Every structure is written in C-alpha cells, then in structure tokens.
Amino acid sequence: MSVLPEERKNEILKELNNMGKVKVMELVEQFQVSEETIRRDLMLLEEKGLLKRVYGGAIKSVFQFEEPPFLQRTTVNQEAKGRIGQKAVELISNGDVIVIDVGTTTLEFAKFIENKNDITIITNSLPVSSVLTESLNQNRFSGQVLLLGGQIDPKQQSISGSLTEQLLNQFNVDKAFISAGGVSIKSGVSNYHLHESLVSRKMVEVSKQVILLSDYSKMGVDTFCKVCPLEKLDVIVCNQPMTEEWRSHTNLENIEWIEA
C-alpha cells in the first residue's frame, strides 16, 4: 500500500479513533514500510498531542494541556488547512456579519476571503486581523474588520478575557467560523486554552450559524477545555469525509459535513 507520509499518518489516526489503539507491526504490514518509518510517524503524532506511544504501538490521547505556540503550528497540515479555508469561504454571503476565532485553520480561511461585498468581520486573532487588513487595502473584499479588545497572549497571538466576551455581546452575528484543538462525539468541540475557549464559546452563543473548520487530525481528540457540544454546530468543513462510525450518531444528523 503506497501512500504519502501525510496520508499514512491520517490513516493511522483513523484506525486509532476507531480501535482506540494501534500496533507497530500491524501498521508495518498494512503500509509496507519499515518499523523505523512507523515509529517516526507515531513520534511525530505524539508531538502534536494526537496519541500516546506505548510499548509496541500507541493509544488515544485523552487530552493535552498544552500545544505548540501559534507560529510553530502554522506549518502543521498546512495544505489541508488551506483546502478547508478555501472551501469555507464559499459559505460567506454578501452583507454577512461574521466572527473568526483564533487558530491556524481560521488564519488560512482569512487568507482566501475575497470577492465579498459589504461584509463585517470580527476577530480576536492578531494574525487574522493583519491578513484581513492587507486584503482590504488590496480591495480583495469590501466591508470592515473589527479587532476585539482584551488581554493579548503573545505566544498564541490571541486576544481574550472578560472584556473580549462583553464586546461580543454587542453584536448580532450571522456566522461564526471557529477552530478546534479537538472534536469528539462525547465532548464536542474543545480547545487547549481556557480564555480562548471562553471567547469561542461566546462567539457560538451570539451567532445564528456556527461553522467548524477542522482538519481530520483533530477528530476523536479531547483537549482541555470544552467549547460547545456538537449539537451547537451547523456545519463542519473538514479535509476528509465523515466516517461511518460518526454517521451512526444521532447528535450529528443535523450537521452538514462539507469535505474540502
């Protein structure tokens, strides 16, 4: 079975999500690669907090308290995040008021916003606001960008806190585009950082429609702080199709799954 390294790692995560564990020797046979290659894959996935290595294989990671800094994460699964972002832009209508939270996937989304008229974009992400400001200067879309006030986290390039949440209460929002550290059937959407999660939770609360942008590596993963249950989502944009296991759950039946 000849696949690209990123495809192989995604397949490993799929099997891990379905079975709860994977074995090195079975993966060697499945993908026809060396033990060293599989162990390196597992090591890289563990560094991202997506699994925990054990003797002879790996098990699912229950949750992780920390993730790498924002700038370090921008190169992880970048191609998949770009496809997700480009597809999600199709969901913006002229005249929309939208909110965008903090994340490397939502940053890719912001880069593709163009040919939209009279839209208002609210965000607590410093990189997103910078990208959108440049796009406005280049007349790629028309409208306005509002950067929420609050406490700046230089490591994660975010703005959060009670002031940020209070400001969100002042707006009537059509669509929230949110990211995730993890997405699971049991716990819903979760993230690593408490204060950022609270802002994302408020974005969900004040928006008429909630759109999750998530690459497949986040599926089946629980991180530190819950943002919202899956029932609060209207759309999930992902780089992989929904699995049969997920299709069978009733709390997903009203969610539109868009494959990028």
Image (cartoon, rainbow, N blue to C red):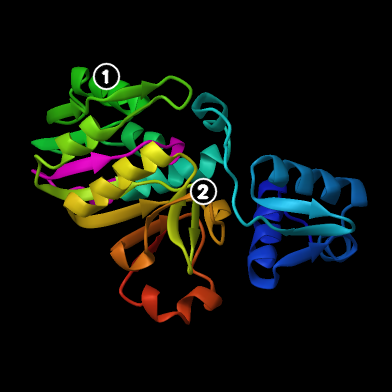
Q: Is residue 222 above or below residue 43?
A: below
Q: Residue at x 42, y 41 (%)?
A: 194
Residue furthest to the front: 162
Q: Nearer the viewer, residue 83 or 40?
A: 40
The disc label shown at residue 40, or none: none
- Give the mark nearest the N terminus, 2 or 1: 1
- Could you say whether the residue bearing mark 2 is in a helix, strand or loop? loop
- Going by the numbered disc 1, the residue's amino acid type is Glu
- Distance Cα–Cα, label 2 vs label 1: 34 Å
> Taking 128 as reference, is 115 left or right?
left
Q: Nearer the viewer, residue 238 or 126?
A: 126
- Going by the numbered disc 2, the residue's amino acid type is Phe
Q: Is residue 79 visible?
A: yes
Q: Which residue is mark 2?
A: 224
- Could you say whether the residue bearing mark 1 is in a helix, strand or loop? helix
Q: Which residues are magenta?
A: 89-105
Q: Nearer the viewer, residue 151 or 259?
A: 151
Check the picture and name the quadrant holding the C terminus: bottom left
Q: Is residue 57 above or below residue 45?
A: below
The quadrant holding residue 236 is bottom left
Q: Is residue 195 above or below residue 207?
A: above
Q: Which residue is mark 1?
A: 134
Q: Residues within 10 Å of mark 1 (few under 14, many from 20)?
A: few
Mark nearest the camera among 2 and 1 is 2
> Taking 208 as reference, is 201 left or right?
right
Image coordinates of residue 54 in percent, x first then y, are 83, 55
The quadrant holding residue 160 is top left
Q: Residue at x 57, y 42 (%)?
A: 65
Image coordinates of residue 51 in percent, x first then y, are 69, 53
